[in-house]
Image (cartoon, rainbow, N blue to C red):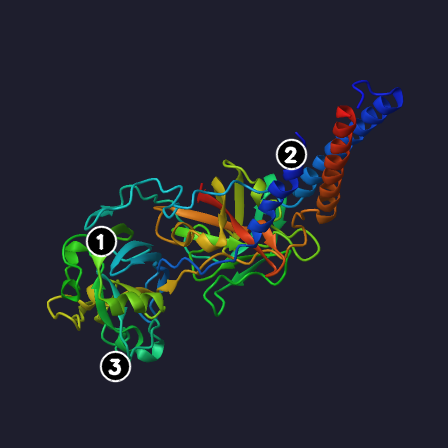
């Protein structure tokens, strides 16, 4: 009894040291989100969210958008080392035809680097494989296990890649325009509708407290308790000696 | 050496024994009380450290090369609109202001400068949009409770109401409240594509407070979905 009491302060004091284990580095796992908003000039009313999780050279993506024009919606991750890494500006509409083509958006968002298809190939060569993308005014799908080049994974984590969803609705002369990517398709099928920069998720936790209400371990009480226990051990020893004598 | 203690000696032994018991009990009590957190914000249990996947994702994640189209997705989403207010009746939160939060230079989430206001992470979805919208607030300032002081007491089933600039209201139901060490923060589960619906994350601090760094060691995260 006395022995365990004497040891008690030591045993109980051990947890005191645990809260001071250092805060390690952030647990980076390469998650990024793009808020998809209408591309200037082209008149889309759509909006959406694209989310990408990067694990090594694989990505998993989720694409959800609504308010789009009817018809197919080619969707890609765009990146260009020399691009501005942003959605197109009105000034990118260079030829004055009242629509911003996919090519005109190039200086802003770069080239297609991943085709966000539902099935099959995901390389840029599937960029216009309209039968393998979402279709209609609302699209929602996700896909995992998509292999990307290391520089694309890096670009996503650096916030330099964008998600662009194509396919708009035109009236008048613009409805007759041919696609700059494939003359067999109307421009409305391939012109960019909504766009967003893939922004890396915040790393680690949040510093949402200053400690004003943090519970404190009462060091005064602990010291007092320790003294009390040592004294108890002393008087206990005294009592035991007297009882034996 | 007598085997019979004198009355005086016996009293001495009894007195010493009594003092021993008293000191022992008092000392143990003082140590126990001294180790107990005295007050402080409510603390939900620490989540399993392997919680890299969404705690409330209704479906299973896709395997390599597979796609899930619409199935499992909730069609119930709102368009993007800035959140302007937050109310959580069950823990007494009712704020008519939300500030914008981005990322700090080190990549971590900005936090509100005002301990009485919560903030919305603008590079993520807006509350009501598809995906996880994030609202963070302080558990305390240097001298008193912050807006999310009671977040750790939030329970599954509680309702969170977020007012939006377009005049609409997004109502969420809490699915889970958990505490995570900051050095093992579940970034994908909080910010990533682990859901197929509009969700909400509420973040504050918790766990022990490191007076050397001036930071709490854990984050308390509430997970909710759009009703």
User: Residue furthest toward the front?
Assistant: B1
Secondary structure under the numbered disc 1 in the rendered image = strand
Q: Quick one: label 3 or label 1, which is nearer the N terminus? A: 3
Mark pair 3, 1: CA separation: 39 Å
Q: Quick one: label 2 or label 3, which is nearer the N terminus? A: 2
Q: Name the residue located 74 percent from the left edge and 28 percent from the top edge.
A: A240
**Circle 1 marks a residue in which chain?**
A
Residue B217 placement (x, y as % from top left): 54, 53
Residue picked out by circle 2? A3
Residue A230 placement (x, y as % from top left): 72, 40
User: Residue furthest toward the right?
Assistant: B8
- Picture disc at residue A145: 1
Which mark is in front, 1 or 2?
Answer: 2
Which mark is in front, 2 or 3?
Answer: 2
Secondary structure under the numbered disc 2 in the rendered image = helix
- Picture disc at residue A95: 3
Q: Name the residue located 74 percent from the left edge and 48 percent from the top edge.
A: A220
Rate crowding at label 3 as few (under 14), some (14 to 19) or many (20 or more) other CA atoms within 10 Å: few
Residue B227 placement (x, y as % from top left): 45, 41
Mark pair 2, 3: CA separation: 90 Å
Secondary structure under the numbered disc 3 in the rendered image = loop
């Amino acid at each position: 009894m006395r022995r365990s009491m004497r040891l008690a302060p030591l045993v109980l004091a051990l947890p005191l040291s645990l809260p001071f284990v250092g805060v390690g580095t952030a647990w980076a796992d390469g998650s990024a989100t793009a808020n998809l908003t209408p591309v200037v000039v082209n008149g889309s009313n759509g909006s959406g969210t694209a989310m990408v999780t990067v694990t090594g050279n694989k990505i998993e993506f989720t694409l959800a958008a609504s308010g789009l024009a009817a018809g197919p919606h080619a969707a890609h991750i765009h990146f260009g080392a020399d691009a501005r890494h942003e959605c197109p500006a009105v000034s990118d509409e260079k030829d004055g035809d009242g629509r911003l083509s996919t090519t005109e958006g190039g200086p802003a968002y770069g080239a297609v680097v991943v085709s966000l298809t539902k099935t099959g190939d995901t390389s840029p060569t599937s960029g216009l494989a309209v039968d393998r993308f979402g279709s209609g005014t609302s699209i929602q799908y996700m896909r995992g296990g998509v292999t990307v080049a290391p520089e694309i994974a890096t670009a996503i984590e650096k916030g330099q890649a964008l998600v662009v969803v194509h396919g708009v609705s035109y009236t008048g002369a613009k409805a007759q325009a041919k696609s700059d990517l494939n003359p067999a398709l109307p421009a409305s099928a391939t012109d960019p509708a909504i766009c967003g920069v893939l922004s890396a998720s915040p790393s680690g936790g949040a510093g949402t407290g200053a400690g004003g209400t943090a519970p404190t371990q009462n060091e005064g009480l602990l010291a007092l308790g320790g003294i009390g226990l040592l004294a108890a051990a002393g008087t206990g020893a005294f009592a035991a000696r007297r009882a034996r004598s | 050496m007598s085997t019979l203690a004198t009355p005086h000696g016996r009293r001495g032994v009894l007195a010493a024994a009594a003092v021993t018991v008293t000191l022992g009990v008092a000392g143990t009590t003082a140590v126990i009380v001294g180790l107990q957190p005295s007050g402080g914000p409510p603390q939900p249990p620490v989540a399993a450290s392997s919680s890299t996947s969404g705690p409330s994702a209704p479906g299973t994640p896709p395997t390599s090369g597979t796609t899930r189209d619409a199935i499992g997705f909730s069609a119930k989403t709102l368009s993007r609109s800035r959140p302007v207010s937050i109310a959580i009746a069950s823990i007494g939160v009712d704020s008519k202001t939300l500030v914008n939060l981005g990322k700090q230079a080190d990549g971590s989430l900005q936090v509100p400068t005002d301990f009485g206001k919560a903030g919305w992470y603008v590079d993520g979805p807006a509350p009501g949009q598809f995906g996880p919208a994030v609202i963070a607030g302080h558990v305390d300032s240097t001298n008193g409770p912050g807006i999310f002081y009671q977040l750790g007491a939030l329970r599954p089933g509680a309702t969170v109401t977020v007012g939006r600039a377009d005049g609409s209201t997004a109502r969420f139901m809490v699915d889970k409240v958990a505490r995570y060490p900051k050095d093992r923060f579940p970034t994908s589960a909080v910010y990533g594509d682990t859901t197929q619906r509009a969700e909400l994350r509420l973040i504050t601090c918790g766990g022990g407070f490191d007076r050397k760094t001036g930071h709490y060691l854990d984050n308390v995260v509430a997970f909710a979905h759009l009703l």
